[in-house]
Image (cartoon, rainbow, N blue to C red):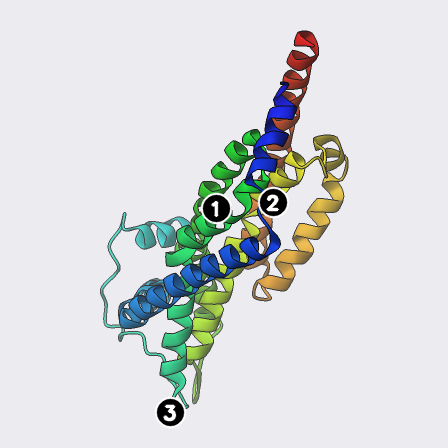
Amino acid sequence: MSRTDQDEAEIEASRAPLMAHLIELRSRLVVCVVAFIIAFLVCFYFAGPLYVFLVKPYAVASALHSVEGAHVSPIRLIQVMVGLQPVPTGDHQAVQLIYTAPLEILFVKMKLAGLGAVVLSFPILAWQLYRFVAPGLYRNEKGAFLPFLIAAPLLFILGAALVYYVMLPFVMLFSLSQGIQAEGVTASLLPKVSEYMSLATALILAFGLCFQLPVVMTLLGLAGIISSKVMAEGRRYAIVAVVVLAAIVTPPDPISQLMLAVPLVLLYEISIWCVRLIELRRNQAEAAEAALG
């Protein structure tokens, strides 16, 4: 029996009636929902520390701005965020965010809990998805699918870390530098809790999802839908699309757009090499089968 015939036999043996598939789907959805609810409750219980954690970029930017003004070195800002340098202590007041609706804080905590629940329960959700589709995959496809379950959350965390340690502090420092201090006139930043958290969560989701580009493109290459040659020839169009996407999902300032556009262009180049590697292995496997046949 050839390799293809053996794979076909394994898939045929794993087939089940439609009702059995629906029952399995229901059971796996129940597991996913239960996992999400438990993660949501845990994250809601720790919503306060999560709030303090997400406010830290604003606090660091505010402390640096109050001591050094608008001329803060980008390297110094990053070093303070990652803990290589201490947060400056001066006569500046603690950062203050306001809320103007009675239930605004509650809704903010629920949003934070929802975002945290997705991140916390993702391994369970991904594993349930894999176990549901695994019977319909060939043996080599099963081995190729598992690395993406690991790469996807790692790339999401990488994008979120870029937002937390670089993007958000720069955005808040830029916002603080727009204040006006004149005789008889003062305009200073006093953000609402919901607006700041919406900005932070939106940037984290945008960067985390955009950083899935290598995973998506590699899967398309694995399925034979796209080739490295097509990706290389369409590089200029991809760069234009990346710039447009960065302008849509980031705040309206060039610094934020560049911070998303540059990593995405690099990730696109990485995607091309990943697809080339898949094509090389596929050609080698076909040549080996042809030699044996």
In-image side of 234 versus 158 (left or right): right
Element type at marker 3?
loop
Q: Residue 131 carries which label?
A: 1
What amino acid is at disc 3?
Pro
Crowd tier of the residue under label 3, counting other residues whose Cα lies within 10 Å: few below 14, some 14–19, many 20 or above:
few
Whole-number angstrom distance, CA of label 1 to CA of label 2: 20 Å
What amino acid is at disc 1?
Arg
Q: Which residue is drawn at 39% across and 75% down?
A: 110
What residue is disc 2 on?
A: 216
Element type at marker 2?
helix
In the rendered image, the quadrant that contains the C terminus is top right
Instruction: Indicate whether 56 appears above or below 265.
Output: below
Expressed as whole percent of the image width and height from the top left, the position of residue 198 reads 47, 72
In this rendering, the label closer to the viewer, 1 or 3:
1
Whole-number angstrom distance, CA of label 3 to CA of label 2: 42 Å
Q: Which residue is drawn at 31% across and 53% down?
A: 80
Whole-number angstrom distance, CA of label 1 to CA of label 3: 44 Å
